[in-house]
Image (cartoon, grey):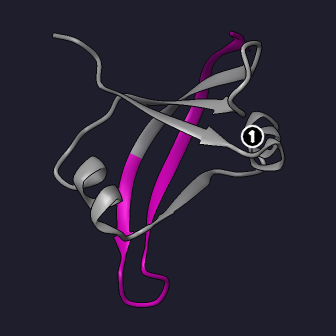
């Protein structure tokens, strides 16, 4: 069975905070686009990249759970676990 991977692009500030383990939850607004990508899906890990260039840094982080908070913040919270691997493309 293939591993399901969620691919996300981040700004440098948030990318570095995830690498430094300061940021443990990544947020996405509840929109039709994110609902299609996240609701009812299970992902083993998140593949984060910083920017869109040819030689961009990346990190794979295990995904603990996806939590929907539509009462206060109207966002999905992607709860991150351990860093699995990282490098440059």
Quarter-wise, where is residue 42 in the image?
A: top left
Which element carries disc 1, helix, strand or loop?
Answer: helix
Q: Magenta part mainly helix, strand or loop?
A: strand
Q: Is residue 75 left or right of residue 51?
A: left
The N terminus sits in image quarter: top left
x then y, percent, for residue 29: 46, 69
User: What is the residue that sits farthest to the bottom in this orientation?
Assistant: 72
x then y, percent, for residue 28: 49, 61
User: Does 66 lie within the magenta span?
Assistant: yes
Q: Is residue 49 above or below residue 85?
A: below
The C terminus sits in image quarter: top right
Quarter-wise, where is residue 33 in the image?
A: bottom left
Residue placed under numbered mark 1 in the picture: 15
x then y, percent, for residue 13: 83, 48
x then y, percent, for residue 45: 43, 29
Residue at figure coordinates x 77%, y 13% from the top left: 55
Residue at figure coordinates x 35%, y 69% from the top left: 31
Q: Is residue 72 above or below residue 31?
A: below
Q: Residues within 10 Å of mark 1 (few under 14, many from 20)?
A: many
User: Does 17 lie within the magenta span?
Assistant: no
Q: Is residue 85 left or right of residue 80?
A: right
Q: Is residue 85 left or right of residue 53?
A: left
Q: Which sits in the foreground, 53 or 15?
A: 53
Residue at figure coordinates x 42%, y 80% from the top left: 74
Residue at figure coordinates x 63%, y 51% from the top left: 24
User: What is the residue that sits farthest to the front in this orientation?
Assistant: 53
Range drawn in magenta: 65-89
Q: Is residue 30 above or below residue 84?
A: below
């Amino acid at each position: 069975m293939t591993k399901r991977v969620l691919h996300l692009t981040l700004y440098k500030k948030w990318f570095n905070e995830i690498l430094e383990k300061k940021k443990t939850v990544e947020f996405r607004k509840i929109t039709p686009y994110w609902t299609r990508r996240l609701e009812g899906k299970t992902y083993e890990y998140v593949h984060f990249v910083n920017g869109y260039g040819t030689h961009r840094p990346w990190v794979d982080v295990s995904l603990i759970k996806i939590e929907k908070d539509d009462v206060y913040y109207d966002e999905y919270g992607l709860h991150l676990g351990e860093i699995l691997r990282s490098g440059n493309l």
